[in-house]
Image (tube, rainbow, N blue to C red):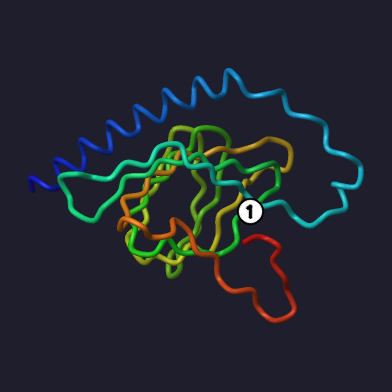
C-alpha cells in the first residue's frame, strides 16, 4: 500500500514535470513544414517517441520512471509492440488515438482521456484516427532500470521495417 502511494506520488510529480517541459518545448518548436510531394506516395508514417524525463526511483530499487511524448502525424500508426515488464500510462494530449491490446477490443481515446497497459501487454494497434490532424500522447513508464521502453514485433515475411 505504501509502495503504491509512493509510486502514485512519483507518477503525479513526473506528469507535472513533463507538462512543464512540454509546454516550454512547444513554445520553441518550429512551425510544421508542408510535406514534399514525394511524401504523399510514401508508406504510412509511424509515430516518434521522444523521452522527456528519466528518473531512477530511489525508494523502489531497480525501477525507473520515464516520461515521453509520442507524436502521431496525420494517418500514422505504431507497429505492434511490447513494453517489456513496464507499467504504462498513456494520456492523450492532442487529437484522437485508436488503441488495442491483444485479447481486447479497440478503443478510441480523445484529448484528455487515458489508458493503462499492464506489464507484458502486447499492443497490437495504435493509430491516429485523423488523416489531416496530428495526435500526441504523454506516456509514463515505470520500468526495470536499463530495460528498453519499446520493442517492436519482428517483421512478418513479405514486409519490411526501416525503423530500429
In-image side of 103 versus 33 (left or right): left
| Local crowd size for mark 1, using a 10 Å CA cut-off: few (<14), some (14–19), many (≥20) | many
Q: Which residue is mark 1?
A: 77
Q: Nearer the viewer, residue 52 or 70?
A: 52
The correct choice, above or below, for 22 with respect to 6 in the image is above
Residue at 59% from the left image edge and 41% from the top image edge:
71
The correct choice, above or below, for 24 with respect to 113 in the image is above
Secondary structure beneath dot 1 equals strand
Tell me the quarter of the image containing the C terminus: bottom right
In which quarter of the view is residue 143 placed? bottom left
Residue at 23% from the left image edge and 56% from the top image edge:
62
Residue 140: x and y, percent? Answer: 38, 44
In which quarter of the view is residue 42 placed? bottom right
Q: Residue furthest bottom?
A: 157
Q: Residue furthest right?
A: 37
Residue 145: x and y, percent? Answer: 31, 55
Residue 115: x and y, percent? Answer: 39, 48
Residue at 55% from the left image edge and 33% from the top image edge:
94
Q: Residue furthest left?
A: 2
Q: Nearer the viewer, residue 25 or 11?
A: 25
Amino acid at each position: 500500500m505504501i509502495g503504491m502511494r509512493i509510486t502514485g506520488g512519483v507518477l503525479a510529480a513526473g506528469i507535472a514535470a513533463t507538462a512543464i517541459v512540454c509546454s516550454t518545448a512547444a513554445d520553441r518548436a518550429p512551425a510544421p513544414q508542408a510535406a514534399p510531394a514525394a511524401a504523399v506516395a510514401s508508406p504510412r508514417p509511424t509515430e516518434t517517441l521522444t523521452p522527456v524525463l528519466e528518473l531512477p526511483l530511489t525508494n523502489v530499487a531497480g525501477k525507473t520512471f520515464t516520461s515521453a511524448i509520442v507524436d502521431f502525424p496525420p494517418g500514422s500508426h505504431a507497429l505492434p509492440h511490447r513494453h517489456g515488464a513496464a507499467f504504462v500510462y498513456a494520456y492523450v494530449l492532442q487529437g484522437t488515438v485508436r488503441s488495442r491490446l491483444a485479447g481486447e477490443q479497440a478503443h478510441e481515446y480523445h484529448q484528455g482521456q487515458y489508458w493503462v497497459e499492464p506489464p507484458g501487454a502486447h499492443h497490437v494497434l495504435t493509430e491516429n484516427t485523423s488523416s489531416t490532424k496530428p495526435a500526441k500522447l504523454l506516456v509514463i513508464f515505470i520500468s526495470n532500470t536499463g530495460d528498453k521502453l519499446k520493442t517492436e514485433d519482428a517483421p512478418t515475411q513479405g514486409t519490411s521495417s526501416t525503423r530500429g
